[in-house]
Amino acid sequence: MIQTVVLSTPRAVSTAVADFLTRAVGSTPGLVLGLPAGGTPIPLYRALVDRYRAGRIDFSRVATFNLDEFCGLAPDDPRTYRAFMRTHLFDHVNIPLERAHLLDGAARRWREEIAQFETKLAALGGLDLAIVGIGNNGHIAFNEPGPALIARTHRVRLTPATRRANAEAFGNRWRAVPTHGLTMGMGTIASARGVVLIATGAHKATIVRRALTGMVTPQVPASLLQLHPNLVVTLDRAAAAKL
Ligand code: GLP
């Protein structure tokens, strides 16, 4: 069942999801979280840092698994999602870095890298909660629209739409954005016991409608989440305008 929560502003969305996570970590200190990059979660991460500084949330036993990463960038490259996560969350809270798992997009032996990632996640019992954004083309993480989806963590060729959407960190030159990424598959993500989809802004309204009320199809990877038994969709009014 989809539970849809519509709030007035992106700030209200981040507050609500941060409060939800604060309660979840409070009752399950060893929570295993799937975390997204992108513009949408930045206010959420800020809200979590605020709650940490106020002593309201303790990440010391939490484990995190980021959903995706660019291929071909060194792990210390400031344009990686690894750097993004340090800037916006990991450098400001007490998540032990050895429990903050990110795919290494520079790994030459990427097949081993994705297998190890799945093994580590499975060893912790899979995701308790996946926080996900949605791409303008309906992607979740780097699961791009197409005739079929790969269920588990894999390497993927990024669409021009996704490279354009990520161009800001690359001097607004979309051709400078890596051509490939590593990503959790929709099966890995949808195996989470709970999924929280967040979307904000009028530019997300059309894809939010297609994903939540349209056909379930790999052409809109986010639509697969309609099948999830415990999906909470948190939107601002602008992103919910076409529902
Ligand atoms: C990026 C990321 C996704 C993210 C999506 C939306 O390509 N790989 O994980 O959810 O696009 O990003 P934004 O929140 O900036 O709209």
Image (tube, grey):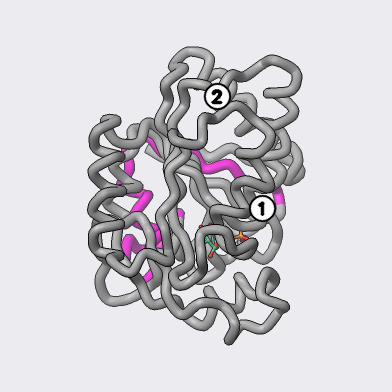
Q: Quadrant of ligand 1?
A: bottom right
Q: Nearer the viewer, mark 2 or mark 1?
A: 2
Question: Is disc 1 surrounded by few (<14), some (14 to 19) or many (20+) residues within 10 Å?
Answer: many
**In the structure shown, which secondary structural element does the residue marked by tag 2 occupy?**
loop
CB-based contact (under 8 Å), mark 2 and mark 1: no
- Check if residue 214 falls in the magenta segment: yes
Mark 2 is on which residue type? Phe
Q: Which residue is mark 1?
A: 200
Hey, which quadrant is residue 104 in on the image?
bottom left
Relative height, residue 51 to residue 126 (above, below): above
Residue in view at x 71 percent, y 33 percent: 47
Camera sees residue 137 = yes
Q: Which residue is mark 2?
A: 59
Hey, which quadrant is residue 113 in on the image?
bottom left
Residue 131, given in percent of the width and then of the height, sits at: 49, 42
Q: How many marks?
A: 2
Residue 215 or 58: which is nearer the viewer?
58
Q: Residue furthest bottom?
A: 175
Where is the N terminus found, in terms of image quarters? top left
Magenta segment boundaries in residue numbering? 212-237
Residue 235, given in percent of the width and then of the height, sits at: 62, 46
Where is the C terminus found, in terms of image quarters? bottom right
